[in-house]
Structure formats: C-alpha cells, structure tokens
Amino acid sequence: MYDHFLYQYINGILKKETDWTKSDNAFYTRFLANIPEIRVLYDELYVTHPAGKESFGQLIQTIIQAHKNRPADLKQRDGTKEDQDHWFLSNQLAGMSLYVDRFCENIQNLSSRLDYFEKLGVNFLHLMPVFESPPNESDGGYAVSNFRKIDARFGQLEDLKSVQAEMLQKNMYLMLDIVLNHTSRQHEWAVKARAGNTYYQDYFHFFENRRLPDEYDRSMPEVFPESAPGNFTWIEECRKWVMTVFHSYQWDLNYSNPHVFVDMLDNVFFYANLGVDLLRIDAPAFIWKQIGTTCQNLPQAHTLLRLIRLCVEVASPGMALLGEAIVAPAEIMKYFGTGNYTTHECDFAYNATHMALQWDALATGDVRVMMAAQHEILKKPRGCSWITYTRCHDDIGLGYEDYMIEQAGWNAFAHRNFLKNYFAGLYPGSPSRGALFSFNPKTGDARISGTLASLCGLEKAISEKDAEATAMAIRKILLMQAHSFFIGGLPMLFYGDELGYINDYSYLDESEKSYDNRWMHRPVMQGEKLKRLDEKGSPEERIFSGTRRLLQIRKQLPVLADTGNLIWLNPHNIHVASFMRRNENKILYGLFNFSGKKAFISWYVFKEAGKHPNRLHDHWHEQDYEPGEDHEYFTLEPYSFYLIEGY
Ligand code: GLC
C-alpha cells in the first residue's frame, strides 16, 4: 500500500546515500518495492516498543550499509542468479555438510580438498559453525561467542574468504549457519548482562525470581532433557534467572527487543557479504517466546523470518534462506510462508519428515507410514525446495504424526518404541548399532543417534567379518541415499557417509562431549579410510563409487530439478515406494524396495499416470526393459532401487 510519508522518508535517505539513478538503481528499486511490507511486519512486532521508532531508522541504515558493503562480484552473481529464476532448484546442485576441523583440520586445508568434492560430485558445501565458540561449551559451534570472528581452531576470516573465492571460481556454492536463537554465555552481550548491565540484560530473557520461569516451564517442552533439563539457568553474578532452552551455556535472545533484531540482521548481512549462497537459520522455531505456549513455531517467529527475508531480498538477493525447523510436518510447511507470504519466507526447509520416514521404512520393510505422510509433504509450494538427507550432525527424531502410523494399521506408541529399539540395536535380530539420544523419562520420548553406516548394519557386519551382511548393509546405505537424492530437493550428504564411516565412540573420553552422544556420528576423517578408496571392492570404495554414480545420474536428468513434479504412484506393494518425476519431455520412475525380500510390482505401475512408455531404461543398473503386460510383474531385488526412464 502506498504510504506517502514512508516513501518520502525512504526516498530522501536513498537519494542522499546511494547512486540511485545509476549503479544502485536495482537496489533502489528493490528497496522501494519492499519497504511497505518491511514496515508492516516491523510494526506488527515493535510498534509499541519504546525503542521501536529509533530502531526502525537503524534498520534502514543497516540495509543500506549492507548494500554498500556488498562486494562487486557478489552483486554480479546476484544478477546472474536472478536471471536463472530460482537457481537453487537445479538438479546440478549436490551438497555436503562437514565439520571443518574433523574433515581437514582447518579452513586453509579445505582448498586442497576441493577436488575431492569434485570427484564425488558435490558442489555445495555446508561448513558447520566456524565462528568463535568456547571449546568446552560449544555444542558443536552452535554456542557462538563472536558472530564475526572465525574460531582460532579453524583459522581466520581471510582463510574463509580465500576458500570462498576459490569455490566461486569452480562454480561451487557456500552454506553457513546463523545461530539466531541464542548466543554463548561468553558472547559480549551476555558478559555485559552478567555484569549487571540492564541494557544488555534486555537482549536476553532475565527474571528476578522463579515466578515467571515456573509459569513458562509449565507449557515448554525440554530440548535436551538428559543433559540440560529445564529451560532456565540461575546466574549467580547478577542473581537472576536467564532463559536457556538448549544448554545452560546457550542464552536465548530476546527478539521482542528491536535492538536484538537489528543487530542480528546486521550479522545476517555480514554472512551474506562473505559470499554465502544459502544461509542456514538455526532453530528458527524457537525465536519468539510467549508465556503459556510451547514457545515454538509462534506466529511472531514467522513474522521475524519474513522480515529477514524482505531485507535480504533488498540488499543481498542472491542469498537464499534455509529454515532449520525440525518440527511436526504441518508446522515445517509454514516456514515456506503462508497466505500472502507463501514462498516469501524460507526458500528451503529440511525434509525432516521424509528423512525419518525413510528410516521407518527401512526398519519395517513397509512404506505405508511414508505414504500416509505424503499429503502433508506435498504441500510444499513451487519455488521453494527441500534439503533432502538421510543423516546430518543431529539425531533422528521420529517427528511425524501418530495418525500417520495408525493409518498404516499400527499402534503409534508401540511402533515408535520398536523403531527406537531397532536402531539402538536392542530389538532382537536388529543389525543396527545406534543409540537413544535425549531420553526423557517423563514422556518416554527419545531420538536416535548413529552414523548412516552403523544404522544400516555395517558396524555389526564388519565386527563379525560377515561378507554377506556387509553387502546387505551397503545395499541399504545406497538405497537410503538414492531415495533422498531423487525425491526432489537439494541432496545434502553428511561427510563421512560417502565412505561408510561407522560410529566413533571416542567422544566418551572427552568431558566436553561425553554428555552428548550425537558425537558418535561426527567422525574425524582418517587418511587410512581415504586410501581404501583405491582398493577395489572395499566397503569404502563401493559406497563412494555408488554415491558418486547416483550424483552423476542426478545431474544428467533435468527432470530431477525441484519443480514440484513428484507424483507418488499407487502403493501396489507395501514394501515398495514408487514415484514418478515428469516434465514436458521426460519421465523418470523411481522404485525403491525397502524390504529384505524380493518384491514384485505390476508393470501397470508405469502406465497408471496416463503415459504408456514403450521402452524403459534403468539408469542405475544400466538395463533396458520392454514393459510387460499388466498382469505380469517387475521384480525388485531386496533393498534395491531402480531409476527408470520411460520413452
Ligand atoms: C540446531 C542444531 C543443533 C543444536 C541446536 C542448538 O538444532 O542443528 O546441533 O544443538 O540447534 O543450537
């Protein structure tokens, strides 16, 4: 809506501070286009705040400054990306998440590893948090004490800049985190707050006594009930309670204070101007707190994200946003935006629901729960995308709804118990070697830790020197990876999985890690394992070359770009997940047998979506087929998959 005074105000500033008719014209146009919405969203949160007006002025200045600081090559890349129309939906992208220190010691060394990613087919790197974080209370870098200083363990800002420049040369993409919800208690704001500075105490949620914390606690779940029970921590120095939803050393920021918003937006721009292509917004579900609620997924959290998105569109339009919302399926969806804001919030979310459903299918050999959840997952709007994955640095939460399990004919409580026991290796006959994470005795809830390989049975098979079980585990690993690479979205491998790393239990000997068993699946890369890549037939070589081939196949087929073209085919067989990806000139069928037995599926599966291909080519097995009659069957081997193009 046209707001004369707002336009006059913003025009005045922009005309004074920018070259608005020439080099800054695109920025000027974007700013004018977005300013009314920015104002509306900002006012929703801050209009009544005493510092609201002053902070709005700072917000405008922050955006202008971000544009001025943006290097010329990034501005050029912004233009190229805009011309591509949703550059991030492309099937050419494949990512990997990695801890720099555990992967190659420091950032400098990364540059000599870029050819490793090229060899594998990965061109999108998610560097796990590299900014300063106290070593003995770091939560893997998610407790940041300085948002702009690279932790000495990893190197310096210059190192990151030079790797980013090299990556740019190779047309690779960079993803970093912004830990938006909290800071380390060693961050300068927290240090000042502890010392009694009330201006900075307002950056956090401080309380004089237990009255309000108790009230909050009544409706707030616990994130780490084993290692960090409760949501508040007593701070002796200032004799107050502070909100700490995650660990006691991670202090939740108070976004009802506009100064916090503007300062953190400035950090967002700092990352944008380092050349980040995709910014992973850590734990966005938690950023707004309100007494009497779970303090998760609140409408104001979405308002904040939309506001960030609008500001980023103005000053660093080439940077996409990923909301790390690992919440219930219907809630995840809202991070893509709703109503008028559909596709105007986060560009990406993790497909955490489908990730967990893949594990469900692997344990049960049955895809009915997976299918029961699809009506929700398919609501993802066109123009947004998923990060698809089988494992990441975090635990696996069985976050889908009970009714989805019940639709498959099971009791939800018993089913979840089975899955947890199965992957923890407690269920009789289970080949998995994982562990329960964050068991909550009050609710019986738990999540699952363990590497892809250990959960798929490789650890057990190797320790028992069982060649057949090893082969079966490798089949499962590739089945899981293939499924996540082909359902639509940007595949994000977790480092080490491409080499079949099994659990590493050495974290138990390190006091700063031993309380958190997620460290079992965060390996330290070893030269030995890499050498085994050259040994034909070793598990490392088989897994690596299988993963590489999958990525190659994916890159050859534009039909796999995430244009919202996924169609699930009728569940002819409860063991087989079958889908179709289709564009104007190609059709690709994906068939995945999650059971340990042969499965049979009618040839009719290839016809039911209206197209009747005469010839079929399976890219994975490099085999051609003539479709059989409807009453005849296509046979799928145990834990196998087929990537079939129809002609
Ligand atoms: C995110 C991270 C997780 C971390 C938490 C708190 O969920 O992925 O590793 O513990 O945020 O920052």
Image (spheres, rainbow, N blue to C red):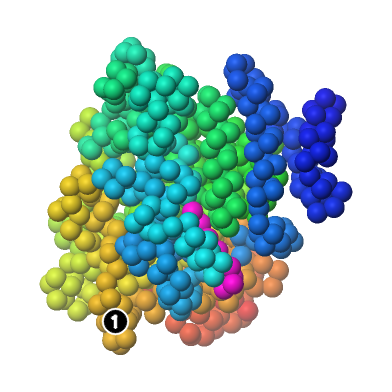
Q: Residue at x 29, y 68 (%)?
A: 525
Q: Is residue 287 left or right of residue 1?
A: left
Q: Is residue 216 left or right of residue 582?
A: left
Asked if residue 291 can be seen in this view, the reply is yes
Asked if residue 408 can be seen in this view, the reply is no
Q: Is residue 30 left or right of residue 276?
A: right
Based on the picture, tell me whether residue 175 belongs to the magenta stretch: yes
Q: Residue at x 56, y 44 (%)?
A: 268
Residue named by callout 1 = 531
Percent x, y for residue 596? 29, 68
Quarter of the rendering occupied by the N terminus: top right
Residue behind label 1 places its C-beta within 8 angstroms of ligand 1: no
Q: 94 or 168, which is in the foreground?
A: 168
Segment tinted magenta in the rendering: 168-176
Quarter of the rendering occupied by the C terminus: bottom right
Crowding at dot 1, Cα within 10 Å, few <14 / some 14-19 / many 20+, comes out as: few
